[in-house]
Amino acid sequence: MIVLADALISLRNLIWIVNIAAAVFLLGVAYAAIRERRRRRVTPMNKLKYHPDEVMEGPRLERMGAWALGAMAVIAVALPAYWLLEPGRQDSMDDQFLETSITQGEELFAPSGSNEFALGCADCHGPEGQGGATVQSVEISREDLDLAGGALDAADRICAPIEDDDTSLLCQVTWQAPALDTVYLRHSREEIERIITYGRPGTPMPAWGLEGGGSKNEQSIENLADFIESIQISPEEAKAQEADLTDGRELFEAHCARCHTKHWSYAETFAGDANFDLLVVPAGGAFGPNLTNGVTLRQFPDIEDHIQFVIDGSDFEAPYGVRGIGSGRMPGFGGMLTEDQIRAIVEYERSLGEGEATSIRQLLGGREAGGDGGDGGEEDAPPAEQGAGEGGEQAGGGQAQEENEQ
Ligand code: HEC
Ligand code: HEC
């Protein structure tokens, strides 16, 4: 590749040299012609004696013919050679542009403060785009929070009262940010650029594009999209990563709940804390619609259509199911989950009944996040100062986020 690029660069130089030589030659000819005219001004051309007809139509004509043939031969070789190399030259320019764009995207993606252009995508999505988390302040309604004993200790680890608001609490939560090294398996490039431009209101994901109220022009959004595209893992690798999950509910929680279950993205914050419990309605609807109560059975009477929809995701303005119209926001999972896994998720979805609120501690109990928090007693409460430190540090970041309640 590099050798070819070098060859093409020297071809470009060669073309320059040939062009300059040609220009010098033409100027020389013009100069000589003018001088010749001046010198011979006295005798007009038509009065001059020239070769006799035998010479003109004999050897001289042949000599001219030979020159013409030679020139034509040069063109015949040079033109196709140029024509053959041209697509390669264009491709190599495209490659060069793409490389520059990826490098610029990488700078934008980098952890904040690591270079002068860094936007800090890596702070939340992980340095390799493998997924991560960010600490945020979120308002959560008291209805959705179950306070042990009903009382709120102001020095508590997670939540604190809000002045003049007795319906909600301000909670420091750890909000999971999805992996981006698989995002092209779920979304089209256009959808990805739209997400980056407009962000996702109600989550820590800010709008970055000018149109969304951010500060970055289209070029920067493209740089980011190019960089993210360059770090994608293959469908095989993605499927291998997910291979150990087979249970429909757990698969749903790992891949779908962040959009379809309100509070899900930070639910684990509460799982191990004896003072709080968070109530969620699994698949009860958040960014994506409510999937409980037979809604999906009505949308997809045939389970195969339902599975196909989850494989493909939605497209902007494209119909799905019985009466659905896509917005392009529902990802397609066929690139990162096997059909068996998707079938398991869909069967779980279709089994969802009334959509009742469930305790996070019970739901996650026994899984690593909750640890011994399952039905663990109050004595497991972590020390308060640990939380205060965490909270104070993050409040300095000043990215308090409000979530739409009700
Ligand atoms: C403060 C944390 C934070 C920062 C900084 C951040 N994101 Fe995000 N991003 C998130 C969260 C959280 C989500 C998921 C939102 C949700 O659950 O709906 C997200 C979602 C996304 C998605 C959609 C992924 C999907 O599968 O739904 C893309 C693409 C994305 N971010 C790109 C970026 C890029 C590019 C940057 C940097 C310019 C960036 N993000 C910076 C937190 C962040
Ligand atoms: C990035 C957020 C997001 C994720 C992740 C997500 N969805 Fe969705 N989902 C949506 C949105 C938004 C819609 C509404 C359709 C649209 O806007 O195109 C939707 C629609 C649906 C519907 C159709 C509901 C109806 O009644 O119209 C089903 C079924 C569904 N999703 C299942 C899933 C499953 C299963 C998963 C996980 C494998 C999943 N979703 C992951 C955002 C998401």
Image: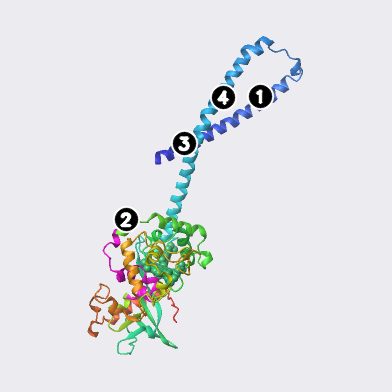
Judging depth in this view, the residue of 155 and 299 nearest the camera is 299
Identified at 31% across, 56% down, the residue is 237
Amino acid on which the number 1 mark rests in the picture: Ala
Between label 2 and label 1, give the one nearer the viewer.
2
Question: Does the CB distance between marks 2 and 3 fall below 8 Å?
Answer: no
User: Is residue 368 depicted above or below 101 in this figure?
Assistant: below
Q: Which residue is mark 1?
A: 32
Sequence order check, earlier mark of 2 and 3? 3
**Residues under numbered marks 1 and 4 in contact, where contact means CB atoms less than 8 Å apart:** no
Front: mark 1 or 4: 4
Q: Look at 53% across and 64% down and name the residue there.
A: 210
Residue occupied by mark 3: 10
Q: Position of residue 121 (x, y in %)?
A: 41, 64
Count every numbered label the image shows and give the total. 4
Label 3 or label 4, whichever lies nearer to me, is 4
Work out whether mark 3 precedes mark 4 in sequence or the reverse, and give the earlier one: 3
* Nearest to N terminus: mark 2 or mark 1: 1
- Identify residue type, mark 4: Ala
Residue annotated with mark 2: 236
Any magenta on residue 64?
no
- Mark 1 or 3, which is nearer the eye? 3
The answer to which image quadrant residue 192 occupies is bottom left
